[in-house]
Image (cartoon, rainbow, N blue to C red):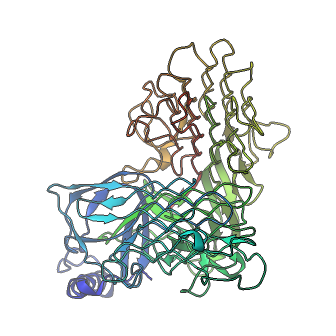
């Protein structure tokens, strides 16, 4: 894995020759000779989360962006003035209802040989960079929303010229939406056909079409699967029922497995053991590295998952595409709603000059800073410490660790913000030789939504998923859900308990959710067995006099109680800044905070506004249109296009989702916003 493009063969052979000559001059001749040429130098650049790894004689550096930012080149190198890239757009949303299409995967573009884009496209040309201008904007596209017809995902881009198109939305009774990969069609005889993929087929294609739906208009309706970067969505023949009974919904098309971050496959999700074809059961999956899978089609039943990039599954509780994969959302069933598309991802890679330290363990994205080796888990995986190093010597480690749970979802309609996931900081934690430990990165909770078209509503938000190290050794609880003022059935005005508690709705009075420490030390609930501490706080209470909702709690402070009416929504609680160990200036882990620096996590979601005014800010930010520590901004009414871009908690922040705003004229979206996924960081002396 990790081979560079064949279009750069001459340059790479020359660079590798310099590296081998350096080894010969320095080590074969006894080292330090005055005739030895200086080692080759790579770019000096910043941005994203850093991953350094070795492939053959070369060492590569990858910059992984799961949120928008800037790739900045500050010094040139001797390996040339080009970089490799992967750009995946946001996946399309699925269509709501029984038998509607799944969302298509976000468009997939890459310059890495062996990781070619969908639709028959080969690897693209490398991207030239320089110190003038030096800064290259990276935009991460969001997933499309599930609805009566799923909306298209948002484009992702790298620099001014590399843009991937958002995945097409699943359809109701019409043709699936066009996009990077096409959306799945609804039941065909009422008009649905497969959604077209961007420029498919051909050398500039970014994915595959969606699948055709089916219906006999009396017995069943079945939605087609969304297209993936590696294969078309599954569809059905037009005409009578193939089995005389209601078939399952169609699988989403497979994604593509990428090696751009090295052989550890430390981004993406599990995928099929055999590439090609359409998605299947998770039992056939291999771990890691898969991106841009299509969402499963809806039916009376449904496929377990749109595998190969984590498109949403037809019968799975995980109905939305996974964050930072570009996976499509699942089509609706008779009860649960359609899933949203997953956000996109951008990776930039190049060969580096310095011979970096060798990691003593494996797992996650690996970087080196200030004498420490850092393993960053942006998705679930395994941290493994080998039996021995250097001639059989045991390899015990003492690590520092940060674990953030997934943030809670905001409630629906004048609702409380979601609470942040707990943030656990463990110090001086022993890791034995020959040990292997599972890492779970918790997902953010879904925002609240009302029941419609025969579906069961859940107007309160959903709790975030815990992040864990070694199952129960360290648990960072998922954030509590935001409370809702209305929306039958299942309305709950109180904020939910969780890592940090969700904010309460304004009507009532309703109380906020409490912050709940992980259950690892019953005698001292605020501490963990690893000698660290877990941080979480309560959400804000609702205001019964003004009917204004409270903000979700954050790892660094409680959510604000609902304010007066009229007025803006209130802020979610403050987050916390990562310890100095993890503040590598080359890396983009975490989000901005109140000290004008980055590296902040676990901010609470802002409360939704009632009738007028802006939604509350995330993470304690003073401005109603901004956010700290990854917390989402609360909704407001009327929703002004372009004014509310940050309602969801940020990817890999553990931030709570913003609460939904009010919709007095019935035209604005009052759904709660999604909580941010968690993160796990492990460091030890290099």
- Horizontal and vertical percent for residue 168? 46, 64
Q: Is residue 388 left or right of residue 117?
A: right
Q: Quadrant of the N terminus?
A: bottom left
Q: At x 54% / y 46%, what residue is drawn?
A: 653
Left or right: 71 as drawn, with respect to 108: left
Q: Position of residue 256 (x, y in %)?
A: 49, 77
**Corner quadrant of residue 19:** bottom left
Is the residue 398 above or below the residue 551 in the image?
A: below
Side of 278 where 430 appears, left or right: right
- Tell me residue 370's x, y (percent): 43, 53
Could you tell me which residue is drawn at 53 percent across and 70 percent down?
191
Q: In terms of depth relative to the viewer, which is nearer, 37 or 59?
A: 59
> Which quadrant of the figure has residue 602?
top right
Q: Is residue 481 above or below residue 143?
A: above
Q: Is residue 337 visible?
A: yes
Q: 491 or 496: nearer the eye?
A: 491
- Extreme residue in the left direction: 132
Number of numbered discs: 0
Q: Is residue 224 visible?
A: no
Query: Picture quarter containing residue 43?
Result: bottom left
């Amino acid at each position: 894995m990790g081979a560079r493009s064949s279009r750069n063969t001459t340059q790479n052979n020359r660079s590798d020759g310099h590296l081998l000559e350096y080894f010969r001059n320095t080590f074969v001749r006894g080292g330090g000779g005055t005739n030895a040429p200086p080692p080759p130098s790579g770019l000096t650049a910043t941005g994203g989360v850093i991953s350094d790894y070795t492939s053959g004689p070369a060492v590569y550096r990858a910059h992984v962006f799961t949120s928008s930012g800037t790739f900045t080149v500050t010094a040139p190198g001797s390996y040339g003035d080009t970089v490799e890239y992967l750009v995946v757009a946001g996946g399309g949303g699925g269509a709501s209802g029984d038998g509607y299409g799944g969302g298509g995967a976000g468009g997939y573009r890459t310059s890495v040989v062996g990781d070619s884009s969908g639709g028959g496209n080969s690897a693209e040309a490398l991207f030239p960079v320089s110190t003038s201008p030096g800064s290259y904007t990276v935009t991460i596209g969001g997933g499309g929303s599930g609805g009566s017809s799923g909306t298209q995902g948002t484009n992702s881009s790298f620099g001014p010229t590399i843009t991937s198109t958002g995945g097409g939305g699943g359809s109701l009774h019409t043709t699936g939406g066009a996009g990077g990969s096409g959306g799945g069609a609804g039941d065909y005889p009422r008009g649905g056909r497969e959604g077209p993929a961007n420029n498919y087929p051909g050398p500039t294609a970014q994915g595959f079409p969606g699948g055709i739906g089916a219906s006999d208009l009396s017995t069943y309706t079945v939605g087609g699967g969304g297209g993936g970067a590696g294969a078309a969505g599954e569809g059905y023949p037009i005409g009578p029922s193939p089995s005389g009974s209601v078939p399952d919904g169609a699988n989403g098309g497979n994604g593509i497995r990428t090696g751009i971050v090295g052989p550890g496959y430390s981004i993406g999700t599990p995928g099929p053991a055999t590439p090609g074809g359409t998605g299947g059961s998770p039992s056939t999956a291999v771990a890691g590295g898969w991106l841009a899978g299509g969402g499963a089609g809806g039916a009376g039943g449904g496929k377990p998952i749109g595998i190969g990039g984590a498109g949403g599954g037809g019968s799975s509780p995980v109905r939305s595409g996974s964050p930072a994969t570009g996976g499509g959302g699942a089509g609706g069933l008779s009860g649960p709603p359609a899933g949203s598309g997953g956000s996109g991802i951008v990776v930039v890679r190049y060969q580096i000059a310095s011979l970096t330290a060798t990691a003593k363990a494996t797992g996650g994205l690996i970087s080196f800073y200030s004498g420490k080796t850092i393993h960053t888990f942006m998705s679930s995986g395994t941290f493994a410490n080998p039996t021995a190093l250097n001639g059989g010597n045991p390899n015990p480690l003492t690590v520092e660790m940060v674990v953030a749970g997934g943030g809670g979802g905001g409630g629906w309609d004048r609702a409380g913000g979601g609470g942040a996931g707990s943030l656990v900081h463990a110090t001086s934690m022993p890791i034995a030789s020959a040990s292997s430990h599972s890492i779970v990165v918790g997902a953010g909770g879904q925002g609240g939504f009302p029941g419609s078209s025969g579906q069961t509503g859940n107007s309160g938000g959903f709790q975030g998923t815990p992040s864990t190290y070694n199952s129960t050794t360290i648990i960072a609880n998922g954030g509590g859900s935001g409370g809702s003022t209305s929306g039958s059935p299942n309305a709950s005005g109180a904020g939910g308990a969780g890592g940090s508690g969700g904010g309460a709705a304004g009507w009532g009075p309703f109380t906020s959710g409490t912050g709940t420490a992980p259950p690892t030390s019953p005698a001292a609930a605020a501490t963990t067995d690893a000698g660290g501490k877990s941080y979480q706080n309560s959400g804000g209470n609702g205001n019964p006099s003004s009917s204004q909702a409270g903000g979700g709690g954050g790892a660094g402070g409680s959510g604000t109680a609902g304010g007066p009416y009229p007025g803006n929504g209130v802020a979610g609680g403050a987050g916390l800044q990562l310890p100095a160990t993890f503040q590598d200036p080359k890396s983009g882990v975490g989000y901005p905070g109140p000290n004008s620096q980055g590296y902040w996590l676990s901010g609470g979601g802002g409360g939704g506004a009632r009738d007028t005014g802006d939604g509350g800010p995330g993470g304690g930010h003073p401005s109603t249109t901004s956010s700290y520590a990854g917390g989402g901004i609360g909704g407001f009414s009327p929703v002004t296009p372009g004014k509310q871009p940050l309602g969801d908690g940020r990817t890999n922040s553990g931030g709570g989702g913003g609460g939904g705003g009010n919709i007095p004229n019935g035209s604005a979206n009052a759904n709660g916003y999604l909580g941010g996924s968690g993160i796990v960081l492990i460091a030890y002396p290099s």
